[in-house]
Amino acid sequence: MIALLTGGAVIGGNAFLTGCSSSEERNLKARLKLTPQQVAFLDEVAETILPTTQKSPGAKAAKVGSFMTIMVNDCYEAPDQQIFLDGMDKLDAACKKMHDVGFMEATAEQRLVLLTAIDKEIKGHMLQKGQSPNHYYTMFKQLTLLGYFSSEIGYKQALRYNQAPGRYEGDVPYKKGDRAWA
Amino acid sequence: MEANTYDAIVVGSGISGGWAAKELCEKGLKVLMLERGGPYEHIKDYKSALREPWDLPHRGRTTIEQKQKYPVIHRGWAASEAVMDGWVNEEDCPYTELKPFTWWRSYRMGGRSTLWGRQSYRFSPMDFEANARDGIAVPWPIGYHDVAPWYDHVEKFAGISGSIENIAHLPDGQFLPPMELNCVEKDVAKRIKQEYGDKRHLIIGRTANLTALIPGRSKCQFRNRCWEGCPFGGYFSTQSSTLPAAMKTGNLTVRPYSLVRQVLYDKDTKKATGVEVLDTETNQTYEFKSKVVFLCASSLNSTWVLFNSATDIWPEGLGSSSGELGHNVMDHHYNLGASGMVEGYEDSYIFGKRANGFYIPRFVNIGSDKRDYLRGFGYQGSASREGWSRDIAELSIGGDFKDALTEPGQWTIGATAFGEILPYHENKISLDKDRKDKWGLPVLAMDAELKENELKMRKDMLAEVKAMLSIAGVKNIKTWDGGHAMGHGIHEMGTARMGLDPKTSVLNKWNQVWDCLNVYVTDGACMTSSGCQNPSLTYMALTARAVDHAVNELKKNNS
């Protein structure tokens, strides 16, 4: 599902062998314990992708940064974990390059311009990537979408949720602007 | 009654085992039901079913650890966070793939009856006559008229919702009210009818979800979370249906962690005396005695038990005298289909989550329709509006993007095909004596594949769905074929087929092992051909029918 949107396979979908030595593994494990600052960074990335609007709270309110941390730790293969972790630094560097400030210091508008540019670049990359490594931005975006729409805020405020509908109707009136069912 | 002695032993607690236990108990027999896995109690053990979806830490995704532990389940769509505990521990219970074989197993109380897809269709006269007509394998020893009253019997109890359609090759049943096709599906159905007249039908799926009350159970709540276990008992499972009925009689004893190693066979009386059980927790072995044994351990595992039984008389196992035990493995080949976009209907939406879709029954090789292959296929699918994971043209990120995703997208429709697989003698399972499971028991080796008939059919399955969707006005139709490894259809069957002749079949027309008449095999192992309909309803009917026979035989012998 999310694969379609970001133009490639869902990351974490395939197991493959890794050639990590044990010291590299230990190092990676340590790096995967994200600091509160890093989680806050991810929250801001997610918030840029899915911000608070008049209609509903954004990804930060849905704690997408913490969700990303769990997913990268538990569901990503080591090479993807590496890419994800390096990706935070790369994104920050890209922001400095574009706006002369780090991502956390950048304004919401600057962040949006940056991520929109990367998104455009990546769409091409993912469509013809073949066996080449995944891109960190694809990870951020996939996890933001999944984390947001599968959160309580996503279910109840962005979308509509009914725990036990009790019946099915196959043709009810819909008017533009009505929220989708979660 | 002596300790460890019962009137009947039922091996397995899934759909077939549950039915065997219920019917035997209700007819007054003292029954022992053996389940190799652990308990899984109705409602109490449905741990995720009443949790909110956002409470799952990985929101439905599985972890790297689970991928390593459950490689087979990760080949398909069944690897989902909420149900991973339901699948067999693949490290403890390996099997050998001489050819690719995807085996979906659930070793716990109720077997796959809590996880099943619930689609329930009768086999038709055409299906029971197929082998005889085509000169394939051996004829079925029974016809539709033999099974029809038992379909009535099991449908009334299980609760099958469906519509009366008067289609000769998909007989109607004792249905609860049908669920509803949605507006797009209705329109596609109409256009198919306009084009093909009475030759093709798009109908609402027939499913074992309650659309009306049945005593002791609640109606389907349209949550579409069935496989987490239904806290409402809204669909048929051992736990919701047959087990409580059997328990109510006071005649049932259930023993979990009981792996049946073999049927005990007495060569003087030529009868089974009971079974030998390995306790999977303590590794102790026990013997349980009974007058009759029902093997309902799942298609391939019932045959595994037979392979390991009476080997001092028949080295290849009990029921092997015909040379057919383990042979003629079937499945339904699928993993292919088509989908596309539907224009219009922007003012229409749905309410509720329907754990069901549409069904297009078989239409090939019927009447004057002739193809370059035998038998046929059906389609299952649905129409829906796209959700948040869709692409939005011109938008990539930001507030407008988010708000757009909170609204439903365009209507889409998709269908997958399920095709009949012929019974080939050379498609077989056997014991891999060099490879052992956690308990030191030899594992199964799978050696089965699709052949020319199925491969030809697959091309047609794609061509026909594309043609029908085109006729229905669907745009941007994409077909896909992911290939099919045997077993992947989760309708694995055969290996102990029924027949008229003990020289060419393992079971007789009452599901009795020809070589040992007080052993009945009533799960998918017994199938002589596969049809293309989801088979569980047929296992229920054959099981109830076999129990009736067994109890009558016992009464005769006692009088």
Image (cartoon, coloured by chain):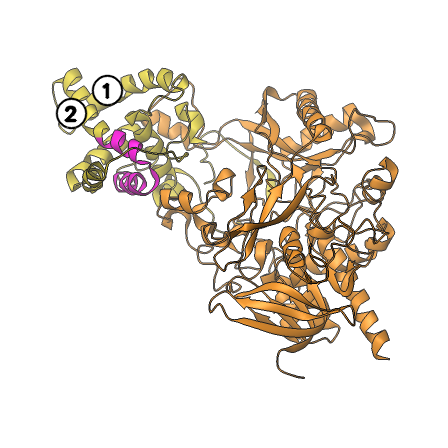
Chain colours: A yellow, B orange
* Residue B123 x, y percent position in the rendering: 78, 46
Which chain's residue wears label 1? A
Name the residue at 71% across, 47% down.
B494
Identify the residue at the far bottom of this view. B1
Q: Nearer the viewer, residue A50 or B484?
A: B484
The residue nearer to you, when weighing B26 against B325, is: B325
Amino acid identity at mark 1? Leu
Question: In the image, is residue A84 part of the stretch drawn in magenta?
Answer: yes
The image shows residue A108, relative to residue B418, as above or below, that is above
Predominant secondary structure, magenta span: helix
Where residue B196 sits, quadrant-wise, is top right
Which image quadrant is residue B301 in? bottom right
Q: Are marks 1 and 2 in contact (CB under 8 Å)?
A: yes
Q: Is residue B445 visible?
A: yes
> Which of the 4 image quadrants contains residue B343?
top right
Q: Position of residue A148 (x, y in %)?
A: 34, 38
Q: Report the disc number at residue A106.
A: 2
The residue at the point 16 percent across, 42 percent down is: A36
Please provide percent x and percent y for residue B365.
Answer: 81, 30
SS label for mark 2: loop
- Mark 1 or 2, nearer chain start: 2
Q: Is residue B540 magenta?
A: no
Query: Residue B217, can we see it?
Result: no
Q: Which residue is mark 1?
A: A114
Residue B207 coordinates in the image, percent (x, y): 66, 48
Q: CA distance from mark 1 to mark 2?
A: 10 Å
Please give the chain letter of the residue carrying mark 2.
A
Return the residue nearer the eye: B179 or B276.
Answer: B276
Q: Which residues are magenta?
A: A61-85
Q: Amino acid at mark 2?
A: Ala
Q: Residues within 10 Å of mark 2 (few under 14, many from 20)?
A: some
Callout 1: SS: helix
